[in-house]
Image (cartoon, rainbow, N blue to C red):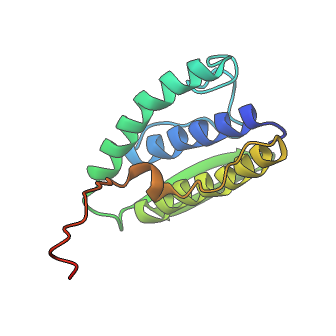
């Protein structure tokens, strides 16, 4: 993507695109225009993207939680030059692509951060979402 900013915008933008597809909403043909709700124009600074993405994350979670039939097919038609191209995938396949797309770009972001000297050692998804609790060891239980 060329920069950390562009990479983060890409992740958020495509998350929104796939969530819209999962909900059956219209999506623009590629390339995604700057008028799309997530774009460099609409989120010129990281703080802008963070606010938009935080709100979007809740909507994406709700979209995924609301899917009851993962085998439902979704068809998308795109005009390309002199032909019509029809793409069909199940909701499970689209959700998987959304998640794998993010992983791909998170790895790119981690590599860029490392090149800048930022110790980005672990960007595993589970580390951001898992609930972690720590308790003192019970000395009587360990003996």
Please identify the residue farthest to the left as the structure is shown.
140
Question: With respect to residue 108, does 10 lie above or below?
Answer: above
User: Foreground residue, 105 or 94?
Assistant: 105
Q: Quadrant of the N terminus?
A: top right
Percent of width and height locating residue 43: 62, 19
Does residue 69 appear to the left or right of 141 in the view shown?
A: right
Q: Which residue is at 34% across, 64% downward?
A: 70
Question: With respect to residue 91, does 108 lie above or below?
Answer: above
Does residue 83 appear to the left or right of 77 in the view shown?
A: right
Q: Which residue is at 26% across, 49% downward?
A: 66
Percent of width and height locating residue 111: 77, 52
Percent of width and height locating residue 112: 79, 45
User: Foreground residue, 82 or 66?
Assistant: 66
Please identify the residue farthest to the bottom as the structure is shown.
143
User: Foreground residue, 133 or 94?
Assistant: 133
Q: Which residue is at 60% across, 25% downward?
A: 36
Percent of width and height locating residue 124: 54, 58
Total number of numbered discs in the rendering:
0
Q: Which residue is at 43% across, 32% downward?
A: 56
Question: With respect to residue 99, does 55 lie above or below?
Answer: above
Classify residue 107 by image quadrant: bottom right
Q: Quadrant of the C terminus?
A: bottom left
């Amino acid at each position: 993507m060329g920069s950390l900013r562009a990479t983060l915008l890409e992740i958020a933008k495509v998350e929104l695109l796939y969530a819209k597809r999962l909900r059956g909403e219209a999506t623009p043909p590629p390339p995604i225009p700057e008028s799309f709700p997530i774009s460099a124009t609409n989120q010129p600074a990281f703080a802008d993207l963070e606010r938009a993405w935080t709100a979007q994350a809740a909507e994406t979670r709700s979209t995924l939680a609301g899917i009851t039939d993962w085998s439902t097919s979704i068809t998308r038609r795109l005009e390309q030059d002199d032909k019509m191209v029809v793409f069909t995938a199940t909701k499970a396949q689209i959700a998987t692509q959304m998640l794998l797309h993010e992983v791909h770009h998170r790895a790119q972001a981690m590599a860029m951060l490392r090149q800048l000297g930022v110790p980005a050692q672990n960007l595993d998804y589970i580390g951001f979402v898992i609930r972690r609790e720590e308790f003192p060891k019970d000395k009587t239980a360990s003996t």
